[in-house]
Amino acid sequence: MPTIQEFQSSDNAARAAQAAEEELSDLRGDRMVLNMGPSHPSTHGVLRVVLELDGEVITKATPHVGYLHRGDEKIAENMTWNQFVPYTDRLDYLAPLANNVAYALAVEKLMGLDRALPPRCQFIRTIVAELSRISSHLLGIGCYAMDVGAMTVFLHTFTEREKIYNLWESLTGARLTTSYTRIGGVSRDLPPGWVAQCRAFLAGVGPVIQDVSELLDRNRIWIDRTRDVGVIPKDVAIDFALSGPNLRASGVDYDLRRAQPYLIYEQLEFEVPLGSVGDCYDRYLVRMEEMRQSVRILHQCLDRLPGGADNAAGEPVCIQDGKVSLPPKHKVLTRMEELIHQFMLVTQGVNAPPGEIYFGHENPKGELGFYIHSTGGGTPHRLKIRAPSFVNLSILPWLAPGHMLTDMTTILGSLDFVMGECDR
């Protein structure tokens, strides 16, 4: 007699066969189904796109996600507020410091601490967020150009990105999984000489960005492969809730740093680049200009940094409240009150009030949002992550049909997604 497992196995096989038959039932004539991914190099991670082709023309594109799913949102329910910081590194792992800042700002909004952050902390968070933007765009444009065939650009951008990783290693102790922020501040102040290193990087990255522009902006092959390919009209971009460079390339003037200012962005001068056509070429141009504007922002932050480069005045980088931030170690070892505060923070977490909030951060890929529902205590009752890569990929079934098969690599590269964030 068949076992329950055998019944279930045969039932699953029947369902899979039925699903495959339904997927093929609407094919007409000589149309072919082609799997692109999940191991294809131009899918930038474990993304599978099922393409229906009429010759070389795409008639249907269905993205299949979830190959990198780790259940981050459920994990958060069993973590204290600070314990979840390392998990944010693994979202957009090309801009981990920006993820750290976004999550910390969301929790601080829930706790009513967003206006109490020390000025030096706000400046440092802005600096690392903008460095993350440059790093992410350098990687995105380098891989995008390499997908289309421009190998030299990739070498230029990766060289500069390694310099940013050197800065991150000096600041956080890690190159990729940084875990730098804390609720109420950052884990440590800028190390000696870090500001000078950052200035040296900014002096060198500008000419490299210009070199990339000269290699691509008027390159005949690049223009033919990207211009008027993957056009997203303004109204369609809004309908699909696109964000970040993909939205602004379609001409929508929406940047959270301007629309809903946070940290010190209200004090800074910078432009929000916009496209006019919304094609792959515009998305490239917007990211190039965003890097230039980030360099401009970083110069302003370093010039105005409270306490200066070496913080001779001793400006704090965390909220001076023992119930929010870990007290200094020497006080923990010599005073009972600080010892109790550290024990409570480490074992139970920061005590958050009941309530629910949403905070959106202008990440390199778009709007990274955190919705938090708290019933009080040291852990969230529910945490939902609005992943810009997931939302931006939703336009693929609308965008891909009508293009040639070779255009798919160009379209995917121009959307600049990362699957760690998409699948969560």
Image: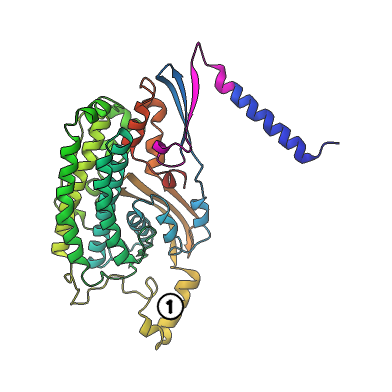
- Label 1 crowding class (10 Å Cα cut-off): few <14, some 14-19, many 20+? some
Q: Is residue 384 rendered magenta in the image?
A: no
Q: Magenta stretch: residue 38 in it? A: yes
Q: Is residue 388 above or below residue 235?
A: below
The answer to whether residue 177 shows anywhere in this view is: yes
Direction bottom: furthest residue: 334
- Asked whether, in this view, residue 269 is left or right of residue 69, the answer is left
Q: Position of residue 329 (x, y in %)?
A: 37, 81
Question: Looking at this view, is 362 or 4 the one in front?
Answer: 4
Q: Quadrant of residue 170?
A: bottom left
Colour scheme shown? rainbow
Foreground of the two, 216 or 398: 216
Element type at marker 1?
A: helix
Q: Nearer the viewer, residue 219 or 249?
A: 219
The residue range painted magenta reads 22-46
Q: Position of residue 110 (x, y in %)?
A: 38, 58
Q: Quadrant of residue 300?
A: bottom left
Residue 253 appears in the figure: no
The image shows residue 412 at horizontal and vertical percentages of 36, 34
Q: Position of residue 295 (x, y in %)?
A: 17, 52
Q: On the image, numbered disc 1 is attached to which residue? A: 341
Give the amino acid at mark 1.
His
